Amino acid sequence: MKQFFLATLLLACAFRVAGQTSSLSPCKVGKNASAFGFWTWAANSNIKVYTLGTDLTELELPYVLKPLQTWNAVSEVTGSGVKFEYIGSTSAPLYCDNCLTIMRGKVFDKAKRHATELRTFSAHADQIMSWAHIVIDPVLTNPAALTNAMAHELGHNFGLVDCYSCKSRSTVMIQFKTVNEPNDMEGPTACDIAQVKAAFRELAVRVRPSPTAKEIVEEGEEPEDDDTPVVIKKPIKR
């Protein structure tokens, strides 16, 4: 049986203040812009989005889904062509092509300071995602903070990495100050758009292999994040 690998990415919604827009120019990695080169969806993909069972309440759902629209709104200007379409709930996490499942799960780690996690799979062992899961720890309950966390995690869906040294109001990839404290980041900033545009220009020329832990650190990700591959079953076609 052919082995497939799950890259479990402990990608922080990890606690320092960020802002909604960027007036800083030009965009500089590590200052007001995230590095790129992480996992991403293929250009011009339509991503089918599901929520797991009753993991999210009727009150929480609109806040979790709102960033799908803010990222959709910049799809053309970034050159990604990637669009998210919310389909509905599912009784189990999905492993189908271009499927994104949003669910609750225990991922909060006080020492590592993360309350959300991106789990992704690449059928070709490169940076192109076949499917992904976004896991939100039950500790994250503030509705506005849920929006901010999702905007951040979707940034990872476009190849952006965390920028712990970036200034507030510059990127959705900045750290959060504390869990459940909203930072008003509901979608990508000007520098996020610029970096995703650059990422997809590069993607049109070459597709990187799956990032290694060393490469992630060099691009700006914190070394505590764990991308150890885990063998999983073959994804289910849907």
Image: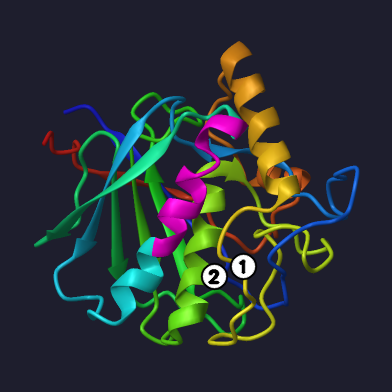
Residue at 47% of width from left, 29% of height from top? 81
Picture layout, residue 127 above or below residue 105: above
**Quarter of the figure with residue 16:** bottom right
The residue labelled by disc 1 is 185
The one of 226 and 176 positioned closer to us in this rendering: 176
The quadrant in which the C terminus is found is top left
Label 1: how many Cα within 10 Å (few below 14, some 14–19, many 20+): many
Residue type at tag 1: Met
Label 2: how many Cα within 10 Å (few below 14, some 14–19, many 20+): many
Q: Which residues are magenta?
A: 66-77
| Residue 30 x/y as whole percent | 84, 52
The quadrant in which the N terminus is found is top left
| Residue 209 x/y as whole percent | 55, 26
What kind of colouring is applied to the model shown?
rainbow
The residue labelled by disc 2 is 148
Residue at 71% of width from left, 64% of height from top? 174
Residue type at tag 2: Asn
Give the side of residue 210 with respect to residue 220, left or right.
Answer: left
Residue at 82% of width from left, 61% of height from top? 166
**Quarter of the figure with residue 186:** bottom right
| Residue 208 x/y as whole percent | 58, 24
Residue at 53% of width from left, 31% of height from top? 76
Dot 2: element: helix
Principal secondary structure, stretch drawn in magenta:
helix
Is residue 10 among the parts visible in the rendering?
no
Is residue 67 among the parts visible in the rendering?
yes
**So how many labels did they put on this image?**
2
Dot 1: element: loop
Give the side of residue 39 with respect to residue 192, left or right.
Answer: left
Contact (Cβ within 8 Å) of mark 2 with mark 1: yes
- The Cα atoms of the two marked residues, 2 and 1, are separated by 5 Å
Q: Is residue 87 magenta?
A: no
